[in-house]
Amino acid sequence: MPKQMTSTVVKSQKINAPTIHQLGNGLTIVAEQMPTEVVNLNVWLNVGSVVESDEINGMAHFLEHMVFKGTPKLSPGEFERIIEERGAVTNAATSQEYTQYYITTAPKDFAALAPLQLDVVLNPNIAEDAFERERLVVLEEINRAEDNPGRRTFSWAMEMGFAKLPYRRQVLGTTGVITGLTARQMREFHSQWYNPTSMTVAVVGNLPVDELIAIVAESVLNLPQLPFVKEENCFLPSAELEPELPHQEIVRREYVDESLQQARLVMMWRVPGRKNLSETYALDVLAGILGRGKMSRLFRDLREDRELVSQISVSNMTFGCQGLFYVYAKLPTENVAEVEKAIASHIATIQTAGVNNSEVVRLKTQVANRFIFGNERASDRAGLYGYYQSLLGDIESGLNYPDYIKALSPHHLQTAAQNYLSPTAYGIVVVRPA
């Protein structure tokens, strides 16, 4: 069993002061007045590729496209035209676990534009002719992704990282699946997942909080109530998924990619996800110590000193059920074996000798400063609130993140490495040029 890592969190003075309000229909609104001459509205839905079955993989992303193709109130293209006329900005993104829509507008235009953003999200027409046209756009996006060597490497790595969990699948879906989807299936999928109980609306800008909340609430409550239709081919929500066991040995897969000039190496370990959030903080810091920035251990050793790689980075990817500790390197093919051995050796050193307190202090300073810099814009704050409230039901985890990092000691980091980062058991993907 992994050793428990307990720490004492010392609360720092908050620079954020959001208000959380829940409507009777289940919609959660997070609002904050901020002295900047914009208002950012972030709409978060707990739907991504993780809730899809294999038969409809890619539906969430395809639906993101269709949301902008008109509603009973707005003809196709009208929403974008109105946004552009007001000088506002809108966009969207789909991931494994969420879909996000946002709009940034002048405060004076917010009351007029917010209802339109919420209308397109909750009431898309999903007409047959528009569906067929947009299918071609999505298929072209898949083709471009498949032609991108970086995307190919990441896809192979995720398939190695997760043997069964749906994080292993592509968010975009596959050509075969997208070709077979129907508009009726999408309407059913939208009905199940695009409803107030699955939504968080984060809104930040230079209007009083009560006014921000009232505009969002009125916008949603004035929309027609859509009928709920059960979609039969959905995967289990991520809260019901079970983590996979860590690799028990070195599991290796190799590919050949004719488009590459240099090889790619990815080493990965299955680590805790948001279900065990307290266990992720030390791994975040270890990722920084090993491979984030020019002062990190792997960068200095493998790129600067020994010149074995042209690029190296480390990240701790945290999903709901499970995460991946992920080391990526770009390097000459002849250096692959030596670099793999060196990465494992660095991890073994942390397990036995620990980390320097100066390294911990450096990472704590980085985290604190990035948190401050990441709160400078209304869109930054709305994104922070939307992410944590939507995926964790608790924005305090986001607001207190720097405090959790500050509470970590070198011992916490050494214990995390011992618990989760084995130098003799991991997944590795090597992609070699032809």
Image (cartoon, rainbow, N blue to C red):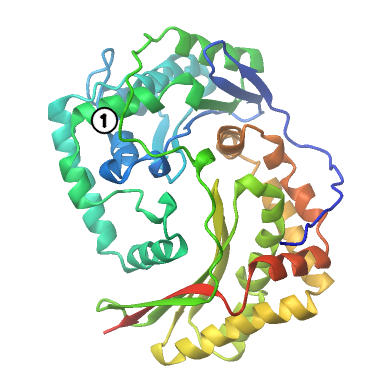
- On the image, the x and y values in percent for residue 374 come to 63, 46
Determine whether, in the image, residue 108 is placed left or right of residue 297: left
Residue bearing mark 1: 186
Q: Residue at x 39, y 36 (%)?
A: 91
Q: Is the residue 220 above or below the residue 283 in the image?
A: above
Q: Residue at x 55, y 45 (%)?
A: 320
Determine whether, in the image, residue 230 is placed left or right of residue 6: left
Say which amino acid is labelled 1: Met
- On the image, the x and y values in percent for residue 290 come to 65, 73
Q: Is residue 331 visible?
A: yes
Determine whether, in the image, residue 309 is placed left or right of residue 406: left
Q: Is the residue 116 above or below the residue 139 in the image?
A: above
Q: Nearer the viewer, residue 416 or 209?
A: 416
| Picture mark count | 1
Q: Is residue 318 visible?
A: no
- On the image, the x and y values in percent for residue 369 come to 72, 53
Determine whether, in the image, residue 333 is placed left or right of residue 28: left
Q: Residue at x 46, y 12 (%)?
A: 219
Q: Is the residue 52 above or below the residue 345 in the image?
A: above
Q: Quadrant of the N terminus?
A: bottom right
Q: Quadrant of the C terminus?
A: bottom left
Choose top left, top right, bottom left or bottom right for residue 85. Answer: top left
Q: Nearer the viewer, residue 193 or 140?
A: 193
Secondary element at image label 1: helix
Choose top left, top right, bottom left or bottom right for residue 107. Answer: top right
- On the image, the x and y values in percent for residue 221 come to 47, 9
Q: Nearer the viewer, residue 108 or 434?
A: 434
- Density class for disc 1 (Cα within 10 Å; few <14, some 14-19, many ≥20) is many
Q: Nearer the viewer, residue 126 or 239?
A: 239
